[in-house]
Image (spheres, helix red, strand yellow):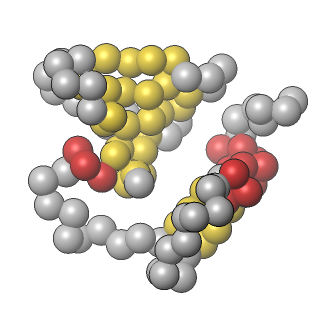
């Protein structure tokens, strides 16, 4: 689960980046390996992992992406805005995996 943040969000400390696709990269702690964030390579969007925050009480679960690829056992009680992978790629202007 992630929280959308300012596109130019920065991190302090031992942070590494792994280019996970032609358009995005994953940020992680180089000391413990914890996932910190995912961001577009062009800097247009950053989504920070919820576990990176000390207090998550101010956040609300409002959306799900790539619902067409979710495991059958994932079923959340909250009413959310759901987007398929194609809808996500269209919103952010990223090339789809299939073309």
Q: How many marks?
A: 0
Residue reaching furthest front? 73
Using the rendered view, name the quadrant where residue 8 is placed: top left
Image side of residue 66 versus residue 31, left or right: right
Residue shown at 41% from the left, 70% from the top: 61
- Front residue of this view, candidates 4 and 36: 36
User: Percent from the top left, x then y, of residue 69?
Assistant: 69, 51
Vertical side of 65 occupied by 43: above or below: above
Query: Could one spot residue 71 in this view of the protein?
Result: yes
- Front residue of this view, candidates 12 and 33: 33
Image side of residue 77 versus residue 87, left or right: left
User: Percent from the top left, x then y, of residue 14?
Assistant: 18, 18
Residue shown at 72% from the left, 44% from the top: 89
- Quarter of the figure with the N terminus: bottom left
Vertical side of 27 occupied by 70: above or below: below
Residue shown at 77% from the left, 32% from the top: 97
User: Percent from the top left, x then y, of residue 74?
Assistant: 55, 64
Using the rendered view, name the quadrant where residue 30 is placed: top left
Residue shown at 36% from the left, 72% from the top: 60
């Amino acid at each position: 689960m992630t929280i959308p943040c300012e596109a130019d969000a920065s991190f302090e400390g031992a942070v590494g980046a792994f280019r996970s696709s032609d358009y995005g990269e994953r940020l992680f702690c180089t000391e413990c390996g914890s996932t910190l964030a995912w961001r577009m390579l062009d800097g247009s969007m950053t989504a920070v992992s919820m576990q990176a925050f000390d207090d998550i009480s101010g956040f609300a679960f409002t959306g799900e992406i790539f619902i067409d690829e979710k495991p059958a056992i994932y079923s959340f009680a909250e009413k959310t805005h759901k987007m398929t992978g194609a809808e996500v790629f269209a919103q952010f202007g990223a090339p789809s995996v299939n073309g």
